[in-house]
Amino acid sequence: MGASNFDSGTLSGKNEYYRANVDELKEHYGFDFVSLGLAAFLGAPLKWLYSAGDTSNRHRRIVLAPGHGVGGIVLKTGKPMVFSDIDRELDPRDYSSYPIVFAEDLHSLCALPVSKKNRVVGVLLCAFRSKHDDHIRTFRKLADDLSGSFCGLDVITDDFLDFAWASAIDDGEGTGHLVVRSDLSRTIAAQEDERRRISRELHDGVAQELLTTSFTLRQLATKVDSEGCHLLDEALCNIDSILDELHNISVTLRPSSLDHLGFLAALRSQATVLEKTYGCAVTIRGELSHDRFDRAMETQAYRICQEAMTNASKYSGADEVFVQVEEAGEWISVSVSDYGCGFDVEAPVIRGSGCGLAGMKERANLIGAALEIQSGPHGTRVTLTAPMYPSSAGNSNVPTEAKQ
């Protein structure tokens, strides 16, 4: 950049060199705020030293230990971080953990590690005080342009921390959605794809073969004696039982109603399976103004509710589980409650092979939803509040990578 002509040999010249480059970066890309934070030595805290567009000196008093705040997390992990809409992607209760966000009223940001001699020594933070779909494109251009150096420091611009953000600008819909992709979320995505494949094979393959076999056996009814008819009826009953079991397994893995009829229909289908399997009545109340929503949203919301319904049916000891569905704009709220024995939310006993509380929370995080779990001696309530964008065809607007 043009400012690199400054003399960086003396301390004052070096400081001016940094400030000039930060100023130029802000003007060149139109950022509202740019700051360069540096750590004095390995393991030392990070301080925001050179800033442009700051509203006060408050952020300069922030000292971030490695692993704390935007700068501290990027410094410790050595990985970039990006938020396209902090209000949507970050729980407001966590704002205190990101002091630069509060101090400068930031709403979208990109934080890039800078290194020297293969050691991360600082963080370059570029941010807007507004949110807009174009911001993610600006961040991408910034990363492409700086995939070399800044102020004589190497800039790390790949392997973004937990975000598959590059795919967000290529979704063709202009949504600019970001999808959190931790190791657990990648596992969830792979599991969902495998569930869909196995469910389809059970339904379209094994079940159809059994139906064909059943039809063939029924044709034998007029060609066997009474003893043979008895054995034939027994075989047909066994096939019917196997078909019922295959249907239950297929619904549990991936209900066809979720793909063809939508979220609420899939919940009702799962409720029927749970009632037959565990003998616990599952009552679903409420309606939605739309049958279909974005596919990724439907899938993750359904899995969370499925897990909550299954846990209540299996472990609560209650005779009935209540599912309440409500809608407000493009948000839906689903609460799954029972009057059973409850459990310790902070230290739950691990039972079964479902996705568990961690998986439920990760799925909620994937779609920007809030998940609240309350439990005690008088019962349990799991409440999911999720953004659910209507879709007439059930096609998702979110990045392809999230459609797992």
Image (tube, helix red, strand yellow):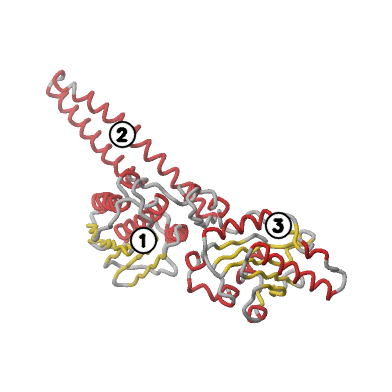
Give whichever of discs 3 and 1 has the lower sequence position: 3
Residue 65: x and y in percent read 66, 73
Element under label 1? loop
Give whichever of discs 2 and 3 has the lower sequence position: 3
> Which residue, given by chain and number where applicable, does mark 3 sit on?
146
Rate crowding at label 3 as few (under 14), some (14 to 19) or many (20 or more) other CA atoms within 10 Å: some
Cα separation between marks 3 and 1 = 38 Å
- The quadrant in which residue 161 appears is bottom right
Q: Quadrant of the N terminus?
A: bottom right
Q: Can residue 179 be seen in this snapshot?
A: no
> Which residue, given by chain and number where applicable, does mark 1 sit on?
330
Cα separation between marks 2 and 1 = 38 Å
Residue 145: x and y in percent read 69, 55
Kind of residue indicated by mark 3: Leu
Does residue 247 lie above or below 278 as drawn? above
Q: Can residue 230 be seen in this snapshot?
A: yes
Task: Please name the residue shown 45% across and 61% down the image.
Answer: 368
Does residue 125 lie above or below 299 as drawn? below
Residue 125: x and y in percent read 65, 67
Question: Is 280 situated left or right of 380 in this image?
Answer: left
> Which residue, given by chain and number where applicable, does mark 2 sit on?
207
Along the viewing direction, whichever of 131 and 266 lies nearer the viewer: 131
Question: Is 401 situated left or right of 231 in this image?
Answer: right
Give whichever of discs 2 and 1 has the lower sequence position: 2
Kind of residue indicated by mark 2: Ala
